[in-house]
Image (cartoon, rainbow, N blue to C red):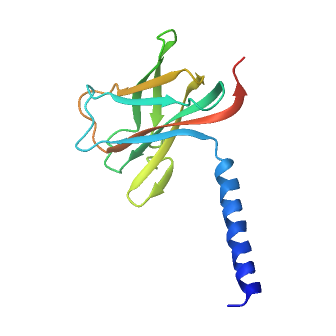
Amino acid sequence: MPIRAKMTRTANKASSLILLLLLCACDNTLYHKFHDIEDGWSSSDTLTYTICDPLAGSHICDAYIELRTTADYPYRKLWLRAETDNAHGSIRTTDTICCEIFDSIGIHNGSTAGLLYQTRHRLPQIELSPTDTVTIEITHIMDGNVSGVRSVGVKAERCGRHLP
């Protein structure tokens, strides 16, 4: 193979790698994890998510609950309790979140992938410093077992604001 062709191919690979690295660097996602739910979600089942970022500076994050449900979910809304706690125990918040799964005429909200529908619901912003670990515990506050929920996730994104 001629030298010029090898150089061109190497330059193309290097350009592609640099582009990929730039695209990855633009992602503000700090944490994104799902817990799968197998045979219905009991009100006594607590889903726990632990967020830490020891390599970054102190910052404020936007946080979200992401739900993946099926058409079998029997209600229009899903009521959740989210408890957020930092590692020092100095900040503990409890929030009740109303997640609208279907709109008023029965159309599923959110995006779809096959038979699953995904909706996203805002949590209060969280403060995270390099020495902190933030724990978010999620339970539903519906009666009994809830069917049609396949997985529950938490996503934290850097929002560009830093702590003093």
Residue 90 lies, with reference to residue 150, above or below; the image says above
Please provide percent x and percent y for residue 56: 63, 31
Q: Quadrant of the N terminus?
A: bottom right
Please provide percent x and percent y for residue 52: 51, 29
Q: Name the residue at the top extreme.
A: 90
Q: Nearer the viewer, residue 3 or 120?
A: 3
- Please report the residue visible at 68 percent of the width from the left and 67 percent of the height from the top: 16
Determine the image quadrant of residue 55.
top right
- Please report the residue visible at 49 percent of the width from the left and 46 percent of the height from the top: 109
Q: Is residue 68 left or right of residue 31?
A: left
Q: Quadrant of the C terminus?
A: top right
Count of numbered badges drawn on the protein = 0
Determine the image quadrant of residue 76.
top left
Q: Is residue 122 left or right of residue 115?
A: right
Residue 131 lies, with reference to residue 25, above or below; the image says above
Q: Nearer the viewer, residue 7 or 152?
A: 7
Q: Nearer the viewer, residue 108 or 81?
A: 81
- Please report the residue visible at 48 percent of the width from the left and 12 percent of the height from the top: 88
Q: Name the residue at the right extreme.
A: 4
Q: Name the residue at the front extreme.
A: 3
Q: Is residue 17 left or right of residue 72?
A: right
Please provide percent x and percent y for residue 118: 46, 48
- Please report the residue visible at 55 percent of the width from the left and 21 percent of the height from the top: 131
